[in-house]
Image (spheres, rainbow, N blue to C red):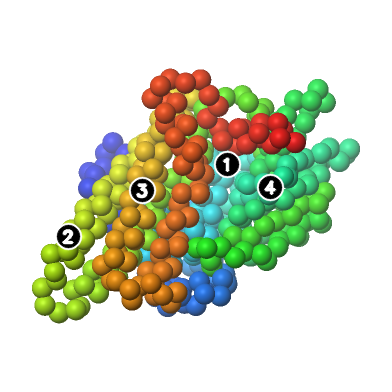
Amino acid sequence: MSNLTEERWVAADLRAPLTPAGRTVVDLLAGVIPRISAEAADRDRTGTFPVEAFEQFAKLGLMGATVPAELGGLGLTRLYDVATALMRLAEADASTALAWHVQLSRGLTLTYEWQHGTPPVRAMAERLLRAMAEGEAAVCGALKDAPGVVTELHSDGAGGWLLSGRKVLVSMAPIATHFFVHAQRRDDDGSVFLAVPVVHRDAPGLTVLDNWDGLGMRASGTLEVVFDRCPVRADELLERGPVGARRDAVLAGQTVSSITMLGIYAGIAQAARDIAVGFCAGRGGEPRAGARALVAGLDTRLYALRTTVGAALTNADAASVDLSGDPDERGRRMMTPFQYAKMTVNELAPAVVDDCLSLVGGLAYTAGHPLSRLYRDVRAGGFMQPYSYVDAVDYLSGQALGLDRDNDYMSVRALRSRTSA
């Protein structure tokens, strides 16, 4: 890994990757993006997952982009460069980028487990990372419970576990080989703990429902997954600590897992800008003053968006390799700039796309126009954890005002589910 302090940084506006591994990934993407872009409109209309694109990703090694080179991957570790690659792909199709993000994120977090986990966890992480590098594993995260459901683990009486529950909004699910499922379990004394079992797709009792009909991100394969007493081996369970522990150290992992997604929404805004400005320039003659004002505003907000995201990613990259000091403080040091950037993106990216519709006019107000797809896709950013808008307000205001609160949204969800049950 290169030394962050020795690099000569360019303006952090996501224009280009900063490392050799990042440039390799972006170069490999360049060969597949034209087809993904050409098929995006049809896949959005029919809501079909781009299986062929992910098969090509596997052949090119892109399914192992964030797997360490020692384990056969492309060795992409820099969060900034991951976001840059996702931005490039999202300019062609945000649905494909969202699904690929799931795999890249899992590579990053599994690498940490491989480097710092207990021996059984390190062994499990290495098996999965090598399979990802070979293009044989597609690993999803299953976080959000279906309404009224608590996904839980129960002892099988023989040292293993049985998992039951139902998860929604599981992206990349059509091709997933493994699911990292956020669940709860009870100790004998009634204490509730968070845990993440790894469940194989062919596990008895696991059903992937083909029921996604989203407003946007329609080709992302964001499905529901049902678990009915699925067996889980003891060495394929990641313990995440007691509910309500108020451990801000977990914010570091949540940042690494999610911050690169901001590149997707920067890519959507950039694609919309290019369509609208190209339309305006192609009409001939000098555009009217109102159109020029919109164009200037688009580029100003895009620069503000990209540089804010770039700064947050640069901060996260520096903090992610610094394991010295207080773990809780490190978690906050990573999460807080991430949330500043996320709030900025969730405000500016939809505004950019909206002004692009104004610039193009009524022609864009049809289901088949590319701006229609971008208008729907960009809105998904506001729902992504961590944090959705209300949770982000709670977190950022809590930091500013010094409020004593649980910042782990998974823990907060678990407490709510127990209270409402």
Q: What crowding class fits label 1: few (fewer than 14 Cα within 10 Å), some (14-19), or many (20 or more)?
A: many
- Residue 46: percent from left, percent from top: 56, 75
Residue 114 is marked as 1
Secondary structure of the residue carrying tag 1 is: helix
Label located before the other in sequence (1 or 3): 1
Question: Camera-side residue: 231 or 361?
Answer: 361
Q: Amino acid at mark 3?
A: Glu
Tell me residue 246's x, y (percent): 57, 24
Q: Amino acid at mark 4?
A: Pro
Point 37% across, 69% down: residue: 371
N-term mark: 3 or 2? 2
What residue is shown with label 4? Answer: 147
Where is residue 357? Give x, y as percent.
Answer: 32, 66
- In which quadrant of the rendered image does the C terminus lie? top right
Crowding at label 2, few (<14), some or many (≥20) Cα neighbours within 10 Å? few
Residue kind at label 1, given as amino acid type? Trp
Q: Is residue 124 visible?
A: no
> Camera-side residue: 20 or 345?
345
Residues under labels 4 and 1: Cα distance? 34 Å
Q: Residue furthest right?
A: 157
Q: CA distance from mark 3 to mark 2?
A: 19 Å
Figure quadrant of the N terminus:
top left
Q: In this figure, which residue is indicated by the disc labeled 2?
A: 293
Q: Earlier in the sequence, mark 4 or mark 3?
A: 4
Mark-to-mark CA distance, 2 and 4: 45 Å
Question: Which numbered mark, 2 or 1, is in the foreground of this view?
Answer: 2
For disc 3, the neighbor class at 10 Å (few under 14, some 14 to 19, many from 20) is some
Count of marks overlaid on the render: 4
Residue visible at 59% across and 65% down in the picture: 213
Q: Is residue 225 visible?
A: yes
Q: Nearer the viewer, residue 5 or 269?
A: 269
Q: Is residue 314 left or right of residue 259?
A: left
